[in-house]
Amino acid sequence: METIIMNIDSENIDYKIIDIFGKMLKEGKTVIFPTETVYGIGANALDESAAKKIYVAKGRPSDNPLLVHIAEVDDIHDLVEEVDGRAKLLMEKFWPGPLTIVFKKKRSIPNVTSGGLDTVAIRMPSDKVARSLIKASGVPIAAPSANLSGKPSPTKPEHILKDMNGRVDGILLGGACNFGVESTIIDLSGGEVVILRPGSITLEMLSEVLGEVKIDPSIMNKDDNQKAKAPGMKYTHYSPKAEVFIVEGDQKEVAKKINELNDENKEKGLKTGVLCLNKNKAMYNAQTFTLGETYEDVAKNLFDCLIELDNKGIDIAYAESYEEKDLGITIMNRLKKSAGYKIIKL
């Protein structure tokens, strides 16, 4: 497949380019485009054959549902059975932005798009390029992250070209994504309010709006969802080729243990990498991949560093752990899944 690739500036949008890619989406083709969270691979959410192309391009199991992106709040009424008071509160507070809401779907949503479920996950991105593209297409856009299934999600243009050139019809390249982790997904399709995937909109932020909000067990533990209601719920996910371990404990003990493991790996001819905060990098005798200073930095840079592990030929990587509250829940969710829940506790 020959892929049309163009660059676009989100601060000075060329709407001729937007129209080209919007037309492609309307015609049932696949297009990769930037959002504020990660890059997405999009197709017409209402076109069964177009949605199937996403699964093929990603090598993704067809029972894993696709997120649907809309350009305006009113667009949701053609797609879902009911927008209740809880949904309205969340939409007023967090849309446009990195929050996806799961609703009971209307029949207009094909089973291919919803992964065979009677629900659909919908969000309205805040990224100017993404919303302009959706508007230009004239249809809601199904768009999971634009990575090969199970691999780290792409947050920069260079992440896209290596794996996806030739697998989709079009690639629209902007800059780096602002948040660096996928949207929070919250399920309103039942009686309880449940977070299915943590993101930049945290449990604490959602609880302030709705009161009691629960977390799906698969977020914190190694529970595998056999019938996932949202992307990323299968526990093997976000994984580089390098084998990843999380090391938990006092920081000095963590550094000591990782340095010992690095020495052992050297003797075996294995190359070691360490995912750490900037302030801790001098503590390690292995190659470091620094994630920044704050939890916001870590969330933004995590997928980029996981991808860099493979670019640098790392065989085994060790990651520092983070307190599981606020944004730390999101970070540890992604780290645990990338590591296949391999945790060294000191």
Image (cartoon, rainbow, N blue to C red):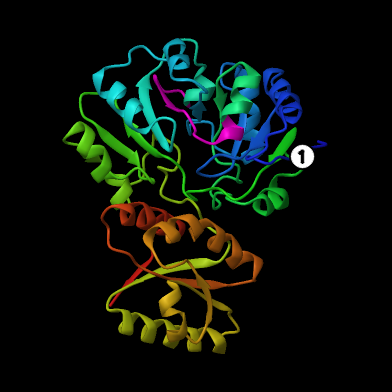
Marks counted in the figure total 1
* Residue range corresponding to the magenta coloring: 115-130
User: Between residues 29 and 134, which one lies in front from this camera angle?
Assistant: 134
Q: Residue at x 58, y 79 (%)?
A: 271
The magenta stretch spans residue 127: yes
The magenta stretch spans residue 209: no
Name the spot of residue 68 as percent of width and height, x first. Answer: 50, 26
Name the spot of residue 231 as percent of width and height, x first. Answer: 45, 38
Which residue carries the number 1 mark? 6
Q: Residue at x 25, y 24 (%)?
A: 86
Left or right of 47, for residue 115: left
Name the spot of residue 31 as percent of width and height, x first. Answer: 68, 32
Left or right of 287, for residue 325: left
Q: Amino acid at mark 1?
A: Met
Name the spot of residue 28 as percent of width and height, x first. Answer: 69, 20
| Label 1: which secondary element | strand
Which image quarter is the C terminus in? bottom left
Q: Residue at x 70, y 38 (%)?
A: 172
Left or right of 341, for residue 313: right
Above or below, 112 relative to 326: above
Report which quarter residue 345 is drawn in: bottom left
